[in-house]
Image: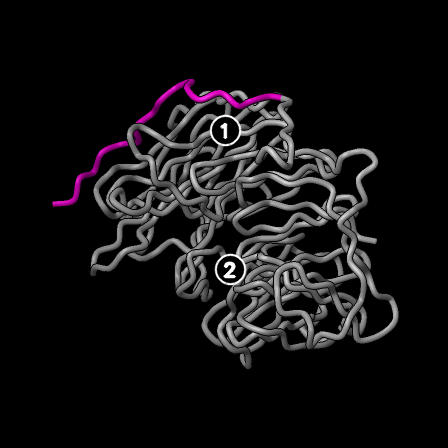
Amino acid sequence: MKRRAALALLGGGLTGTGGCLRLVDGGDSTPQASGTPPASETLQDPSTATTSEAAPTSDGPGAVTLTEVWTDDNGVDNVWTREGTFYYNDYNYAAEASHGDGVRWSADTTHDGVDENLGADAFAADRRYVIFGYTPDGDHEDDGAHFHAYRRYDGEEAWVVAAPSDGTHNQAVGATVVDGTAVLAVSDYGLGDERDPLVYGVDVETGEVRWQVDESVLPPSYVRYLDSYDGDVYVGLPDTVQVLAADTGEPIAAYNWLAGTGRLESLARIHGETLFTAWPGGFDAHPVGDNGVSWSKADFDRVYTTPVIDNSLVVVGTRDGTVYALERQSGETRWEVSITNAVAAIETTGSHVWVGDTDIGLTAHDREDGSLVHRSTKPVNGDDIAVADGVLLLGGDTATAYTID
């Protein structure tokens, strides 16, 4: 019989290192030293771009270059932005970084003897706290996923919440904050016939559990994503979206909407009044509010990364290396391009769509027509990318920030 233990709650603990910027040559993060020539790149023929130090190339006008401004010897698994600030996780690591100055605070996210933890695609923030999720790895694959909350202004840890270490609650799937309640979702990323999804509502200030929902409400399946809209929580499973009340966990509605593929990353996102979600071979838009849009695309290869949505575009990347820019309102294809390797990460700005692949390829495309404006071989290695205030943060084994020129 599977153990049905409640969450293990641990208060206080690890403390972030506030305001500590570290020298590049010493292994820590720092802005580019004064008087040092920037690591700016120049255009060249793409056939010569064979190493991670190779310069970018462009197919036409509007070319952009990248100038390195700071690095962090710790890498990036996933990165998010809030109010012009980067938040990212890595192996046993969480950090907040200024877009232009580097790491403000960082923390070790090992937990209760579990010293092999992967940064999960699970993050939430309100005005005071940020929450990161972690998935145990290696010899700890049966241990429960855990979530760490930190104060935004100084990185002090507020609480840690861990799921049962029973082998079926080891993947941190998602997090969201609704009116003082942090909602956390865990699932299973191993093999087996039994699934026991769990979703918890905890006090965002203390980590105290307010409610929990399990397979008595949710179908016995993987949880694929978690998001919120208008005070309600949306839990995505492969062929069902369950809506819960954020303050009580009570079920409100269920929809037969397809959600997710075999990837561990969240492949769905609520933007405005619409839930956008990927499924094997296609992509859908479902209205969750009165002004939401509804459309479906069923002619994709397998979507391979979290979609990026802004006020006019939905950008989707696939396993076969195709990037689709879709009109947000209609789902019509504005343009599509192919890159080398599967698409691993996407980011949009007012002018460009940035794409990282699963190896060492980085491209930027004009958001209106998809024309190539930047190509370089950067060691993204399938990890995440983000842009804040004209600064691009690349994942990989080392986090590197560049101004976009």
Q: Which residue is mark 2?
A: 267
For residue 196, say whether it is visible: yes
- Whole-angstrom CA distance, mark 2 to mark 1, is 27 Å
Judging by the rendered image, the residue that carries numbered circle 1 is: 107
Q: Nearer the viewer, residue 400 or 388?
A: 400
Q: Which residues are magenta?
A: 1-18
What secondary structure is found at the residue carrying circle 2?
Answer: loop
Snapshot quadrant of residue 88: top right
Q: Is residue 215 left or right of residue 230?
A: left
Say if residue 127 shows up in the picture: no
Q: Amino acid at mark 2?
A: Leu
Is 68 displayed left or right of 29 in the figure? right
> Residue 98 in the image: x percent, y percent?
70, 34
Instruction: Please determine whether, in this image, residue 10 is positioned above or below residue 304.
Output: above
The scheme the figure's colours follow is one colour
- Front residue of 357 and 337: 357
